[in-house]
Image: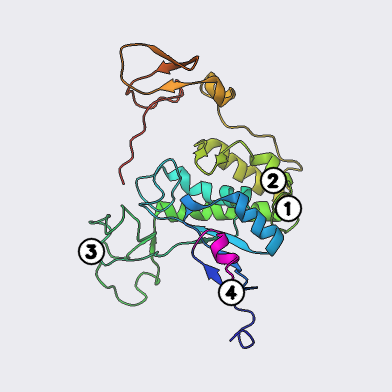
Amino acid sequence: MQNRASKLKKMVSKEPRTEIFANPSCPNSKIDIWLPVFNNFNHTMSWQRMQENNEDSWIYHLCHNNKPPYFNFVTLDHNPIEDMFVGLFHWQYRVRGLAYYSYNNWANNPYIYPNYTEGNGALYLFYPPAKDNSNIPYGSNGNRFVPSQRMEILRDSIELYEYFWLMNNNSLAQPYVSSYIDDLIAGKVILGEKSYIRDDNFIYNLRKYAGMYLSGDINYMPDLVPDCYTARCSANASDYYINFQNISNPNVTVDNITYMAVGWSDYDKTLGYGWLYIFI
């Protein structure tokens, strides 16, 4: 089989694990692509395998695994700006692919029953042409599905990744090698596997100026920064210790660290803290 299909790549739907790539029963068995669910992605191990063994990492999202604090482009219940995180995250962490298991599962009418098995919108990024989910005459709709807003924003995100590729001399970013694009985005939106800044103005301005730069309308990329609504966003995370318990004592001190009590108030971007409720 190896001789007959030498160009086929081997994908394992797991994050890199020593019990897989160093299994003594399969010596010299190369894994071309690792495909972990997003919440199991570890860029340190991914970069090591990429650099030392020429193995790529992709990711995929599931509703029941990728709940907050992870971003998730799949469901209706997550903030739509999270769809734009896909291209940014893939570039920053050198992820080479995105797998998604269902674009148009209409076993139940998604216009009426958005939650089929795992979460609202989980099994479709396209809607059926007819709102009652019935068949339509061939060609009557130009043979087109109806795209969701999630699909359209995801397209913008993938286009932004393509902009980065073009700006990087038509080449992919490499692990442990800083690129010009990293200076534009690092620490501004994707702050880690579980931390993000949801500033749509910054992200779409970045996309706009990248397009203008590539088209020659401007000859340099401006140094964009996300909007700052409170002093917290310009401070180090270690400067703030927050206690979300609903207690009468305004501040609690533990191990000589004072935690500011904020109770159960909803998130307020001016205050810079609060609860954000998402049901999936």
Compared to residue 76, the image places residue 144 above or below, namely below
Compared to residue 72, the image places residue 144 above or below, namely below
Cα–Cα span, label 3 and label 4: 52 Å
Residue furthest to the front in view is: 24
**Callout 4–callout 1 Cβ contact below 8 Å:** no
Judging by the rendered image, the residue that carries numbered circle 2 is 181
**Callout 1–callout 2 Cβ contact below 8 Å:** yes
Cα–Cα span, label 3 and label 2: 45 Å
State which quadrant residue 123 falls in: bottom left
Cα–Cα span, label 3 and label 1: 46 Å
Residue 195 among those drawn in magenta: no
- Point out the stretch of residues depicted in magenta: 14-26
Q: Nearer the viewer, mark 3 or mark 4?
A: 4
Disc nearer the start of the sequence (3/1): 3
Q: Residue at x 46, y 24 (%)?
A: 272
Q: Give the residue type that dot 4 points to.
A: Cys
Q: Nearer the viewer, mark 3 or mark 1?
A: 1
In the image: residue 5, left or right of residue 66: right
Judging by the rendered image, the residue that carries numbered circle 4 is 26
Q: Return the x and y of residue 47 as percentages of the image width and height.
A: 65, 54
Judging by the rendered image, the residue that carries numbered circle 1 is 168
Cα–Cα span, label 1 and label 2: 7 Å
In the image: residue 15, left or right of residue 32: left
Disc nearer the start of the sequence (4/2): 4
